[in-house]
Image: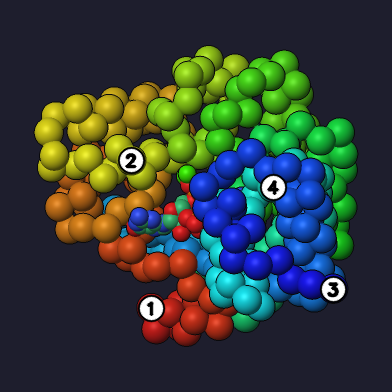
Amino acid sequence: AKLIGSDTYNLYKHEMRLDIHEKFHIENDLRRALEKNEFSLLFQPQYHIATNQYCGEEVLVRWDHPLEGLISPDRFITIAEETGLITSIGKWVLQQACLQKKIWIEKGLPEVPISVNLSLRQFLQQSIVEMVAEVLEESELPPHLLKIEVTESVMIDLDRTSTVVKQLLALGVKISLDDFGTGYSSLQYINQLPVHELKIDQTFVAGIGKGKQAEEIISMIIQLAHSLSISVVAEGVETKEQLLYLTQNNCHKIQGYYYSKPLTGNDFELFMNGLQ
Ligand code: C2E
Ligand code: CA
Ligand code: CA
Ligand code: CA
């Protein structure tokens, strides 16, 4: 089979409307990627500010394309969703994440949750709850060690979303609201659903030290989390100044290059062993 060339990949980058012919190529390419095991996972640790402790990690998928090299999820998740391939890719990611976590627990790493991203399309699939339940059972990972990150865009259908979130919570998994503050119905969402965690979007974190606007929003989100007794994590933390601001404003957890980049499984283990 002919691999698609760089022209087609420029389309990934520019998120242009793809014609049927181009979509067909990319779809085949993604299908082949699944068969040939071209996907891999990176793990980015999270860090509890008050105790100085590692407190979890987020799983970030990568596509190691034979011609293009590492492709970031921003460039293929949307296409995977449009072609329906997100179902298989998403299940593979969850399986690998749960199996990896199980191994790390058995090796004696701390019993803190692993966070996995689910996109809107995945969330709205009829069988999503069954899929999660099945993967948990197969991997024998205790459900409280799995955290599911959902972005606010799932708010498009609050009724459907509430039902799914409640069923997932009933399985014993944790729920984190990703990119908090970037959507339009954040408050309605946390008003209706008992989520465990809010993730302050990195665009706000990037604004720390650059004027009052972003800082006010961040401190408001942190206060909100405190008054609702839920956990709050800031993502995309890159500088000491950002960490200082978040510490002074009582943010619980941070994730970002300041602490660690996303790491391969092996590097993650080395990093963790260095900490212990
Ligand atoms: P996200 O969930 O908001 O993930 C955070 C993104 O910020 C990641 O990009 C991460 O690598 C990057 N990041 C982490 N620390 C820093 C930092 O200090 N500075 C900056 N500038 N960036 C940082 P990545 O890995 O390219 O993922 C992009 C998006 O793709 C994710 O955004 C998430 O929405 C989606 N994604 C990733 N993995 C999966 C997956 O397995 N399934 C689904 N459905 N979506 C995924
Ligand atoms: Ca995320
Ligand atoms: Ca995020
Ligand atoms: Ca994001």
Q: Determine which of the numbered discs, if any, sits on residue 79 in the image.
A: 4
26 or 54: nearer the eye? 26
- Label 4 to label 2: alpha-carbon separation: 24 Å
Disc 4: CA contacts within 10 A as few (<14), some (14-19) or many (>=20):
many
Mark 2 and mark 3 lie on one chain; the one further toward the N terminus is 3
Which residue occupies 17% across, 58% down?
A: 240
Image coordinates for residue 67, horizontal then vertical, percent = 63, 76
Of tags 4 and 2, the one toward the viewer is 4
* CA–CA distance in space, label 1 to label 4: 38 Å
Q: Name the quadrant of the C terminus.
A: bottom left
Instruction: Give the residue type that dot 4 points to.
Output: Ile
User: Within 10 angstroms of label 2, few (less than 14), some, or many (20 or more) residues?
Assistant: some
Query: How far apart, in angstroms, are the residues tagged by discs 2 and 3?
Result: 41 Å
Looking at the rendering, which quadrant does residue 84 occupy? top right
Q: Position of residue 236 (x, y in %)?
A: 35, 52
Q: Position of residue 16 (x, y in %)?
A: 58, 42
For the residue pair 58 and 20, the one nearer the viewer reads as 20
Residue pointed to by mark 2: 203
Residue 141 seen from this side: no
Image position of 47 (left or right of 50): right
Chain-order first, disc 1 or disc 4 = 4
Q: Secondary structure at mark 1?
A: helix
